[in-house]
Image (tube, rainbow, N blue to C red):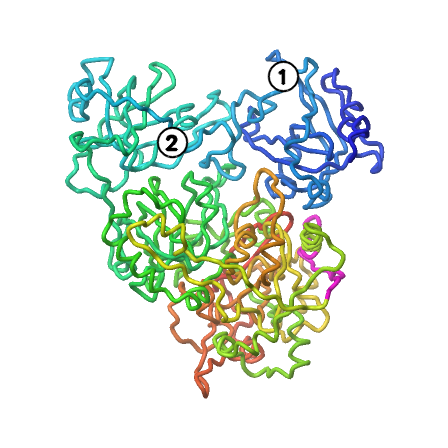
Amino acid sequence: MARSSQSGSALEQLLASVGTRLAGLQWQAQSSDSSQVLAVLAVERYLADPPCCYSYDVTVTDGVWRLKCQLSSNLASLVQRNVLCSGSELRVRCVSFLYDERRLAPGWPCIEVADCVSSNSAVLLGLADPFSLPSLTTGTDGVVRAADESLAGSRKLYLSLWNNEDPYGALWADDTPPVHTSSPEVSKMIVLQDLENFWRSTVRFPPLLVKVMYKSRLRYYGRPEKKQAIPFQAYFEVADRSGMMSMVLWNSMCLDWYQKINVGSVIYVQRYSVKESYRQRTRPKAGDTQIRVFNSLEISLNARDPPADIQVIPHSRVKAEWGLPAVKYQFITRQELDSLPVNYTADVIGLVTYVGRCERIRKKDSAEDFWIYRWVHIIDGTSDQPFILEIFATSQPNVFSNIHPTVCLVCTQMRVVHGANQNNATYLTTSNETQIFITGSHKGQPYISDPKVRRFVKWAKTVEDSEFLEKTSVGGFYIFPPPPEVFRQSDADNQGEPLTCTSELQKQIEGLQYKERKRFAVQGFITAVEYFPWPARRVAAQQQHGEPDDLVQNSTTEQQEPQKAKATVQTEVVKGQSKGQSLTEINDAAQQSCYIRNRSPYKLRPRQRNENKSHKRNIRRAAHVTTDSTLQKDFAEEQISAPNCNSTRPVFESREGAVAQPNSDLQGSSRIQTGWNWQGAHCTSWQSTMWPVVKEHLSEHLEYNCLLPGSVPFKFKYDCKEFLMQQCNLHPAKWSPPDFNADMSSGSIHHLSVDGYYVITLTGLNRKVAISTVFLPVTSPEDPRWLGFAQVPHDNTLFSCLMNGFICSSTAEGGLQRFPTPDAIIQTASSINNKHIICLLDVCSLGGNMVEVFLSKVYDVT
């Protein structure tokens, strides 16, 4: 937009209409034409004043100005479901102007009524740097607030948008400690053992010279009714030659020092306080069993009373005569894992083969606080089985969001967990003191000299590139550990969840927030079963190419025929779309493909598609796996050759050559046509004897019967890793321009092979409510879920497949794996006619109005 038109920009018109000098006066759009469509640059969260829990500020732009506005609490649910998000377009219909009558401060605009027009704004795509646009002053006195200060309330900083543990914003100091040239005076210092013995006899303590042994994640303890400006806390375990003690950073000290102090740092501390320790907290498991631990006290560092003074001593200035202990680790191999007891603390290292999407679980049922976690598989060369890691956010957002296949991952202070099913159900989960490191961050870490780490690095040099890449995937529906073999009501969610009434399901599902996962146990009768190919055009492909229906070959068959697989690859290009606009079209189309209307079920409607002729692309970019040049620098003592990602082996694809296209944060859909109501997509079905009568008298039928593209894992391609990891990570608080053209031009992205899925309709015991869900059985070792099943053979009846979660194969001539056809499986459905069963439903809100509902297991009620 030309600068000469600034006087008539949308934001100026909006503020002029509302009357910035009259508090509380509202501007109301008289028609849709008079409303203002603005692009959302940022959505930021902060602790609200009572009675609300959290409030949101949004930064919007019209392409000329940018403006920060408060979002009315009535619109908070749009953010919580990721409908209103950075990069979206907002049609503003009503704005008020507010003041804080308790402070002498400028006022601010508050968006009262608005609609989300699009998930991708065309305005932002035309701007090189929208955050450099001039800010439109909203205060009557010309005062402009700091960028990281919330508009309303007395809070000093914004929180991370999706959890409270990750640092967010410019107020958090970077990880570069200040350089100190002076050396500490050793003669004036006190050792920790003397501090414990004499701390009650003085109020001014001598300086400490200690090494950081362990570091916890941040803890946020803010509450709406409390007035702390920066309610953060972080624990460090520090040690000297006499022993180890806890050190606590409080409040603003976390802003200044949390990211500057790391495991292995040597710090000189002055002006601190000492108090009795909080005994209920978790503590790390010391790698050095000989070190003495002082658990009765903790060192407290505050910005005042007294103001603590911290100096980080560079490693080059650390002297051996100080006697500081070395950081020791307890690395284990995958071969050793199964023999370790529950809650054993261990460190692990490996190459990442699978990265799940980020998901959230509530800390408490009634709270708005969430844990963020993801599942990761890594291999270390000592076993055919990978480590299965449940990684919660560790206050390292840049590392956590950049875990992708092929990187070398190190996780410290992990706890061993055994699932309810002892076979293949052992995994590791993070503790409060877990730290994670990926390729690029290993250099200088204390563990690089550990013998098991050195052995792993030596093995990594021998990894066969193409073989390794074939085992990698990202995203998709994933649960671990598998549900228990025997259902007890107290174990419905492995955490004591009770059975849920089918009449309450819709309310429970609608209450889920963005990427929130929850498991429900419901009982009733299976009244209908349908099978659909995925993608739906597989039916047409079978008819065109004469593909047999009586067997489905294992994916390894395709890999053995690279030329045939290569010939099926088709890249779909949307005609007439400029850079970024294709992403917008795809994203908006996906929002239309599955939607909720009032309390009605999901429906899928066809959308028009513009297709260009498919073409082949030659990949010439040099890509490096984890053992790349960066990792070589990390482990300088063990030089590793860089595997070649430009393997001639074909990228794994869906059998009909379906190609995934970009979408934003899994709200979007691939260009693959998916769903249940496409013409010619239906294969076979069964219904119980009661269904024709019951379905006519249902009060509600919840139809979550669409297999979403985001529910199927992607085959990992290094050239497209930025795009792929965007699909697996949470939507960012601040908008950044998409830069996928370079990635996408080098090759197409493919889902793991999925032939089809089942839609299971469950009717409650009272026969008033029915719910249709997706059942996607495991049929291939390439499915990341394969590791969770014992693979005990069963008879492949429908009921046994639902109980076990997978379909058994048989070996045919030539070593091919044969599976029973969907028709053959559904023909056995008569055994479940009017059978009383319990179903475990795993539900996850993928953002916007898209909800994923999977049937994970069925139990026979006896």
Determine if the magenta segment contains residue 33. no
Q: How many marks?
A: 2
**Amino acid on which disc 1 is placed:** Asp
Task: Provide the major secondary structure of the magenta segment.
Answer: loop
Q: CA distance from mark 1 to mark 2?
A: 36 Å
Which element is circle 2 on? loop
Would you place residue 101 above or below residue 581 in this image?
above
Whether residue 596 appears in this view of the structure is no
Determine if the magenta segment contains residue 611. yes
Q: Position of residue 674 (x, y in %)?
A: 65, 64
What's the mark number on residue 260?
2
Q: Which residues are magenta?
A: 593-612
Q: Residue at x 38, y 46 (%)?
A: 437
Q: Quadrant of residue 256?
A: top left
Would you place residue 270 above or below residue 680 in this image?
above
Q: Is residue 567 left or right of residue 386?
A: right
Q: Where does label 1 land, which residue? A: 100
What's the mark number on residue 481?
none
Q: Position of residue 65 (x, y in %)?
A: 71, 29
**Amino acid on which disc 2 is placed:** Lys
Whether residue 714 appears in this view of the structure is yes
Q: Which part of the image, by quadrant, shows the N terminus?
A: top right
Asked if marks 1 and 2 touch (Cβ < 8 Å), the reply is no
